[in-house]
Image: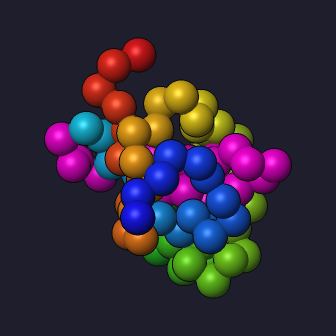
């Protein structure tokens, strides 16, 4: 079942635009807000998959109203602002 509300389980998921192109990865979920790194390195990817992620100055808070759906594998964004 798809949803559009972020949970702690979404850490480490790919963030894709409305066409399916990967634009980043969720490095941390804090108080229901996903923090996305647009250019995660291997270390960031592994840390997030293990639940050890921390948002830093390279990460962006993702507004929940930009989220179209969340699946088991990815967070897909809307195509409108």
Task: Give the main secondary structure of the magenta stretch.
Answer: strand
Q: Is residue 38 magenta?
A: yes
Residue 29 occupies which quadrant of the picture?
Answer: bottom right
Q: Which residue appears farthest toward the bottom when viewing the image?
A: 50
Task: Give the percent coordinates (x, y) of residue 67.
Answer: 46, 38
Task: Judge from the rendering whether residue 75 lies leftward or rightward of residue 16; answer left or right.
Answer: right
Position above or below: 47 against 65: below
Q: Which residue appears farthest toward the left when viewing the image?
A: 19
Position above or below: 48 against 30: below
Task: Judge from the rendering whether residue 24 lies leftward or rightward of residue 50; answer left or right.
Answer: left
Mark yes or no: residue 14 visible. Answer: no
Position above or below: 69 against 77: below
Residue pictured at 30% horizontal, 40% vertical:
17
Quadrant of the snapshot with the C terminus: top left
Residue pictured at 33% horizontal, 19% vertical:
80
- Please provide the residue range marked out in magenta: 19-39
């Amino acid at each position: 079942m798809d949803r559009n509300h972020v949970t702690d389980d979404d850490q480490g998921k790919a963030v894709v635009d409305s066409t399916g192109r990967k634009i980043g990865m969720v490095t941390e979920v804090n108080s229901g807000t996903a923090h996305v790194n647009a250019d995660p390195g291997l270390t960031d990817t592994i840390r997030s998959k293990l639940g050890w992620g921390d948002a830093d100055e390279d990460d962006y808070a993702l507004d929940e109203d930009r989220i179209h759906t969340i699946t088991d594998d990815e967070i897909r964004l809307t195509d409108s602002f």
